[in-house]
Image (cartoon, rainbow, N blue to C red):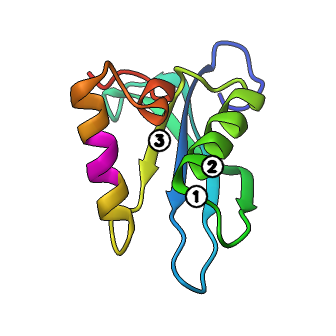
């Protein structure tokens, strides 16, 4: 029992991946939906039938030369336009220049309540 069948429960998670700008490489933002469909109970496996689907919901490249605050604003706007605030995990690539930005966001989050990107994410349990 899957996809549109009665009784199939749908559990969706959203992930926003941000690959920050390099010298000749623009920032890329990708939004991925992971949907788990839970079907009927399978006695032989002693578990519910499950099917996982991944969908690319959004993909964009930002222009070169943008400040990190502008990039952050673009990510916030994209998440809000897709109505994902509080229903997504924002993942920033921490390699290259990303490590400094992630560290800066962590410092901001420590001094204030949260950075703008951290406020977009659902709480991790």
Left or right: where 55 falls relative to 112? right
Residue that appears at 60% across and 66% down: 27
Q: Which residue is mark 3?
A: 90
* Element at label 3: strand
Task: Give the main secondary structure of the magenta stretch.
Answer: helix
Helix, strand or loop at mark 1:
loop
Q: Nearer the viewer, residue 122 or 114?
A: 114
Q: Position of residue 112 (x, y in %)?
A: 30, 22
Q: Residues within 10 Å of mark 1 (few under 14, many from 20)?
A: few
Residue 67: numbered disc? 1
The one nearer the camera, 93 or 39, is: 93
Label 3 close to label 1 by CB (< 8 Å):
no
Q: Which residues are magenta?
A: 102-106
Dividing the picture into quadrants, the one containing residue 111 is top left
Q: Is residue 16 above or below residue 108?
A: below
Q: Are marks 3 and 2 in contact (CB under 8 Å)?
A: no
Q: Classify 10 Å Cα crowding around label 3: few (below 14), some (14-19), many (20 and above).
A: many
Count residues near mark 2 (Cα–Cα under 10 Å), then give few for <14, some for 14-19, many for 20+: few
In the rendered image, the residue lying farthest to the top is 7
Residue at x-position 30% and y-position 35%: 108
In this view, 43 is above or below 45: above
**Residue 71 forms part of the magenta stretch:** no
Pick whichever of labels 3 and 1 is earlier in the sequence. Answer: 1
Q: Give the residue at x 51% y 78%.
A: 22
Q: CA distance from mark 2 to mark 1?
A: 5 Å
Q: How far apart are the two marked residues, 3 and 1, measured between alpha carbons?
A: 19 Å
Which residue corresponds to mark 2? 70
């Amino acid at each position: 029992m899957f996809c549109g069948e009665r009784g199939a429960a749908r559990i969706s998670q959203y992930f926003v991946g941000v690959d920050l700008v390099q010298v000749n490489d623009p920032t890329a933002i990708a939004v991925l939906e992971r949907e788990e469909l839970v079907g009927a109970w399978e006695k032989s496996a002693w578990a519910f039938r499950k099917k996982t689907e991944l969908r690319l919901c959004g993909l964009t490249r930002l222009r070169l030369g943008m400040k990190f605050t502008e990039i952050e604003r673009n990510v916030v706007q994209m998440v809000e336009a897709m109505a994902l605030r509080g229903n997504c995990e924002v993942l920033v690539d921490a390699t290259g220049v990303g490590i400094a930005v992630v560290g800066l966001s962590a410092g901001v989050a420590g001094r204030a309540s949260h950075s703008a990107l951290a406020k977009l994410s659902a709480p991790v349990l």
